[in-house]
Image (spheres, helix red, strand yellow):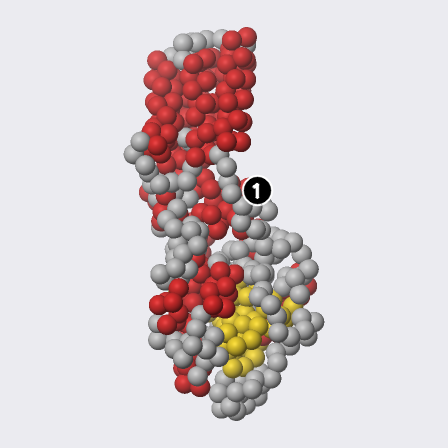
């Protein structure tokens, strides 16, 4: 079976020929490590101090890579066998490239991922080559909890149980690790972090982590609807491996002991660190929008045919992006893209402006249909602002409104009567 590995934004690796649950390629992940308790050059697992019959468990977190699919990090649960000392990485970030209909399910948001068990050193090999840091948080579980979790992972990695329905925000490599730990702790992890929040959202986390790749963060920011703008609890924000690691470091067991007994750096991070949180002011976008609108008004007064020709690529791009957003809403299971208010700024109706715009560029009348559609598109852009400030819709698209509304208005003023 051809397997490839990825995760909540982690990197895609080459297909491998191996039975699920026995071998695989290393998976990427990201997370700034807490203070390490051992030397980071070792890249080996320290001996378990627990009783000989008790497996030792840890959560391994890998820091971001440089390729776009590596930007979001990755994690896995490591189980050290008490008898042999062999360390197995239980990795939820694999999918089957040879699965019939794979591409169609990917587009529709119906991806099937799987849990694969592989040797720890095999899982680490690629990160070492890429310079990505890896650290592990050793868990202070009771013998009963450790044994139960190890057995549950072994059972879940069996081929008949390994598959699960993937969702970028709610069912990925990090949330599966979180849920497995919470089950072993009888819900204690959920109880401690579900009621707390740092004010992050799915959008803010996705845009932050994707920011080194401009086209990637633009895609997230444009494609995510208001469903991605709810404030997340610490439990929900654990879809990011680094956020999960932060919460694990703060979690206490029933008797007050820390859940994480020690943190060990397995590989040093030698490339760019995880992007820091930063505010996103809307006013630079407004200045850019006003500057573009002034240029449109000036050019339209002097060279209306040139303005129409320049407007054609804008309408084509806006119409195609709008059609894609509409498809995500009506034709896929990507819930975070449903009901996207950016459809008012990037309207699929812009495609209907192309014939009339072409006539204007050739010095002819745009036609009644052109004028009607242009009015509708402009009213839709104004409606985005209306929804934001009067009806108080929650989608965080203020920068896009500030950039595009002045441009839509200026095009309407100059081209409506041409």
Q: Quadrant of residue 135?
A: bottom right
Question: Could you tell me if residue 313 is visible in this image?
Answer: no
Judge by depth and name the residue closer to the eye, 60 or 347.
60
In the image: residue 167, left or right of residue 208: left
Seen at 58% across and 57% down, the residue is: 64
Seen at 44% across and 86% down, the residue is: 143
Question: Quick one: which residue is furthest to the front in this view?
Answer: 256
Element type where label 1 sits in the image? helix
Q: Quadrant of residue 235?
A: bottom left
Judge by depth and name the residue closer to the eye, 149 or 97.
149
**Crowding at label 1, few (<14), some or many (≥20) Cα neighbours within 10 Å?**
few
The vertical placement of 181 against 336, above or below, is: below
The vertical placement of 125 against 402, above or below, is: below
Judge by depth and name the residue closer to the eye, 373 or 49.
49
Seen at 52% across and 61% down, the residue is: 242
Image position, residue 387 (x, y; %): 33, 33
Image position, residue 211 (x, y; %): 56, 46
The vertical placement of 380 against 333, above or below, is: above
Seen at 38% across and 40% down, the residue is: 395
The vertical placement of 210 against 129, above or below, is: above
What is the count of numbered marks?
Answer: 1
Residue that label 1 marks: 214
The quarter of the image holding the C terminus is: top left
Image position, residue 283 (x, y; %): 50, 31
In the image: residue 339, left or right of residue 43: left
Image position, residue 261 (x, y; %): 52, 77
Question: Could you tell me if residue 297 is visible in this image?
Answer: yes
Question: Quick one: which residue is furthest to the left in this view?
Answer: 391
């Amino acid at each position: 079976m051809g397997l490839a590995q990825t995760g909540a934004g982690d990197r895609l690796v080459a297909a491998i020929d191996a039975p699920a649950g026995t071998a695989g390629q290393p998976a990427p992940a990201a997370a700034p490590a807490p203070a390490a308790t051992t030397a980071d050059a070792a890249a080996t697992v320290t001996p378990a101090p627990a009783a000989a019959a008790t497996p030792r468990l840890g959560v391994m977190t890998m820091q971001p890579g440089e390729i776009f699919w590596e930007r979001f990090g990755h994690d896995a649960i490591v189980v050290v066998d008490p008898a042999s000392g062999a360390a197995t990485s239980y990795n939820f970030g694999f999918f089957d490239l040879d699965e019939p209909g794979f591409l169609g399910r990917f587009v529709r948001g119906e991806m099937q991922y799987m849990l694969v068990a592989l040797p720890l050193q095999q899982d680490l090999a690629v990160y070492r080559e890429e310079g990505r840091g890896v650290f592990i948080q050793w868990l202070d579980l009771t013998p009963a909890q450790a044994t139960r979790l190890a057995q549950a992972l072994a059972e879940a990695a069996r081929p008949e149980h390994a598959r699960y329905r993937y969702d970028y925000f709610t069912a990925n490599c990090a949330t599966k690790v979180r849920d497995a730990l919470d089950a072993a702790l009888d819900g204690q992890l959920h109880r401690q972090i579900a009621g707390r929040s740092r004010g992050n959202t799915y959008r803010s986390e996705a845009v932050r982590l994707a920011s080194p790749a401009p086209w990637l963060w633009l895609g997230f920011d444009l494609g995510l609807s208001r469903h991605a703008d709810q404030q997340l609890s610490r439990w929900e924000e654990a879809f990011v491996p680094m956020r999960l690691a932060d919460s694990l470091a703060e979690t206490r067991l029933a008797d007050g002991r820390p859940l994480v007994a020690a943190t060990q750096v397995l590989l040093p991070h030698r490339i760019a660190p995880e992007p820091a949180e930063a505010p996103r002011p809307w006013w630079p976008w407004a200045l850019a929008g006003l500057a573009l609108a002034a240029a449109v008004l000036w050019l339209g007064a002097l060279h209306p045919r040139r303005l129409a020709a320049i407007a054609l690529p804008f309408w084509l791009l806006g119409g195609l992006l709008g059609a894609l957003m509409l498809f995500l809403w009506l034709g896929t299971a990507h819930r975070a893209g449903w009901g996207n208010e950016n459809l008012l700024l990037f309207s699929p109706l812009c495609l209907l402006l192309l014939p009339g715009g072409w006539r204007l560029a050739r010095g002819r009348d745009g036609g009644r249909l052109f004028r009607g559609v242009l009015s509708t598109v402009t009213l839709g852009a104004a409606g985005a602002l209306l929804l934001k400030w009067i009806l108080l819709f929650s989608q965080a698209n203020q920068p896009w409104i500030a950039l595009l509304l002045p441009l839509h208005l200026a095009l309407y003023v100059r081209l409506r009567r041409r």
